[in-house]
Amino acid sequence: MQRRLGRLLDRATGVEELGRIYFAPVDVRLSPHDIVQPDILFIRRDRLASYQPGGVVEGAPDLVVEIATPTSRLQDDGPKKALYARAGVREYWLVDPAAGGLRVFVQNERGDRFGELAPEHRVSFTQRCSLFPPSTSRRSSLEYASVP
């Protein structure tokens, strides 16, 4: 699941070299006391310097993707989501393979919490990621139907 979703993201971002996709294990230092390892993360091209030698990201990535498991589901949808919001992650995707769904969260106007972009969706839902602008040369939207 992680690699397949990563390939979709890579295609969406690679067309116009919008940034870089990274896969766990990559430490993300959100604060001196908060270090996490998201399943997948995206950093925009203009912020790639936040990726430090040794595989550490200093500060909030633009996009974080967590793939929920039965043991991580409560953490991913609760404390981790809140931490990502407080740290300034612009968009957070929570993929739940067992439920067959994807939830997309975006920063609110104050930048201190997430609002759910849309209610729980089956992966057949097609939606444009807010971080990837429409492409004039090729469509840069993600087809969530391709995620299963």
Image (tube, grey):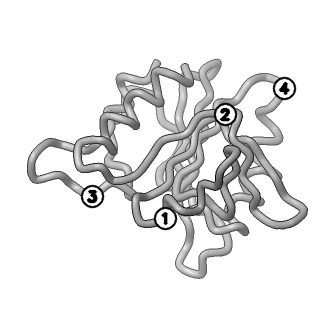
Mark 4 neighbour density, 10 Å: few (under 14) some (14–19) many (20 or more): few
Residue 16, position in %: x, y? Answer: 24, 49
According to the picture, the residue beneath numbered tag 4 turns out to be 71
Mark toward the start of the polypeptide (4 vs 1): 1
- Depth check, mark 4 against mark 1: the one in front is 1
Task: Say whether disc 1 or disc 3 marks the residue closer to the N-terminus.
Answer: 1
Mark 4 belongs to which amino acid? Thr
Residue at 81 percent across and 38 percent down: it is 74
Residue 32 position (above or below residue 51): below
Image quadrant where residue 50 sits: bottom right
Judging by the rendered image, the residue that carries numbered circle 2 is 24
Between label 4 and label 2, give the one nearer the viewer. Answer: 2
- Asked whether disc 4 touches disc 1, contact meaning CB atoms under 8 Å apart, the reply is no
Which mark is drawn over residue 103?
A: none
Provide the secondary structure element on which disc 4 rests: loop
Mark sitting earlier along the chain (4/2): 2
Q: Which residue is mark 3?
A: 133
Distance, label 4 to label 1, CA atoms, is: 32 Å
SS class, disc 2: loop
Q: Is residue 146 above or below residue 9?
A: above
Mark 3 residue type: Pro
Quick one: label 3 or label 4, which is nearer the N terminus? Answer: 4
Q: How many marks?
A: 4
Q: CA distance from mark 3 to mark 4?
A: 35 Å
Residue occupying the far right of the picture:
33
Q: Would residue 124 be found to the left or right of residue 65 on screen?
A: left
Q: Amino acid at mark 2?
A: Ala
Mark in the foreground, 2 or 3 = 2
- Mark 3 or mark 2, which is nearer the start of the sequence? 2
Residue shown at the point (81%, 66%) measured from the top left:
31
